[in-house]
Image (spheres, rainbow, N blue to C red):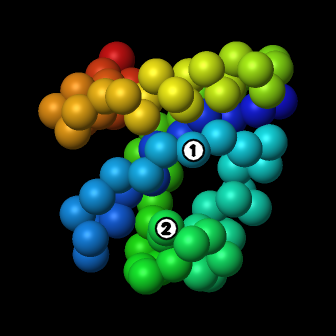
Amino acid sequence: MFYTYILYSKIKDVYYKGFTSNLESRLQKHNSGESNYTASVNDWEIVYSCTFDSKTEALKEEKRLKKLNRLSLEKLISSKNNP
């Protein structure tokens, strides 16, 4: 299984998009400063995730998410959390 995810930091008021094969471990790495971009704060929380059977599919979705503007990301997050 592979996951595409969006993290949110209240301190920075910013979203981070990524993919992984282990969502819990990846979140821990973001919050412990092991990832360069997210190392400046440790309040990252998962606000969106999707599961894929292949790495290729997850990477494709990550690239799509990275092209979205903030409003589009927030609509996506809201629709996923409020079906």
Name the quadrant of the N terminus: top right
**Looking at the picture, which amino acid does disc 1 mark?**
Gly
**Residue 13 at what x, y percent from top left?**
23, 63
Element marked by disc 2: loop
- The image quadrant of residue 41 is bottom left
The residue to which callout 2 is attached is 37
Q: Nearer the viewer, residue 81 or 51?
A: 51
**Looking at the picture, which amino acid does disc 2 mark?**
Tyr
Element marked by disc 1: strand
- The image quadrant of residue 53 is top right
**Residue 18 at what x, y percent from top left?**
57, 44
Name the quadrant of the C terminus: top left
**Residue 46 at what x, y percent from top left?**
49, 51
Q: Are marks 1 and 2 in contact (CB under 8 Å)?
A: no
The residue to which callout 1 is attached is 18
Q: Residues within 10 Å of mark 2 (few under 14, many from 20)?
A: few
Q: In this rendering, is residue 2 above or below 21?
A: above
Residue that lies at the very extreme toward the left in this rendered image: 71
Residue at 59% of width from left, 81% of height from top?
33
Rounded to the nearest angstrom, the CA distance separating label 1 from label 2 is 11 Å
- The image quadrant of residue 34 is bottom right
Q: In this rendering, is residue 47 above or below 43?
A: above
Residue at 31% of width from left, 28% of height from top?
68
Q: Is residue 81 visible?
A: no
